[in-house]
Image (cartoon, helix red, strand yellow):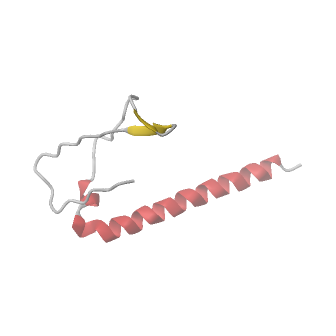
Amino acid sequence: MQIDWISSLPKILFMQLNRLKFEQGYAVKVMSELNLEKVIYPDRFLIANKEVSEKLRSSVDALRNKVKYLERCLQEYKNFE
């Protein structure tokens, strides 16, 4: 994932998304609907908050991986005969 860090927040924020996926070495545009939250938190992308944001993202990734592991363990437990 590429993150562009900003130094200050603008009064009006315009976002342009290029959503691509790669199939057999070719870029294919993703045309499915994109749902966004009503509130966004652009302070997460401020250069001043970069270190904290990266640590939080890392923690969230670790927790998501732990949840997946625990779900697999639970499923194995349920399937135990």
Quarter-of-image position of residue 14? top left
Image quadrant where residue 66 sits: bottom right
Q: Identify which residue, 78 or 12, lies in the foreground.
A: 12
Determine whether, in the image, residue 51 is placed left or right of residue 80.
left
- Compared with 55, 12 (above or below) is above
Residue sitting nearer the eye, 39 or 31: 31
Q: Answer left or right for 52 relative to 7.
A: right
Residue lying furthest right in this view? Answer: 81
Query: What residue is drawn where x is 33% and y is 41%?
Result: 37
Locate residue 59, reporting x and y percent.
47, 65
Q: Report the residue at 27% width, 53% height from top.
A: 41
Residue 35 horizontal/vertical position (percent): 36, 35
Q: How many callouts does the rendering have?
A: 0
Q: Please report the residue visible at 27 percent of the width from the left and 56 percent of the height from the top.
A: 4
Tell whether 31 sits left or right of 49: right
Please tell me which residue is depicted at 69% across the width and 52% down the height of the picture. 72
**13 to the left or right of 40:** left
Q: Nearer the viewer, residue 10 or 29?
A: 29
Residue 17 lies, in percent from the top left, at 29, 40
Question: Where 24 sits versus 74, above or below?
Answer: above
Q: Residue furthest left?
A: 11
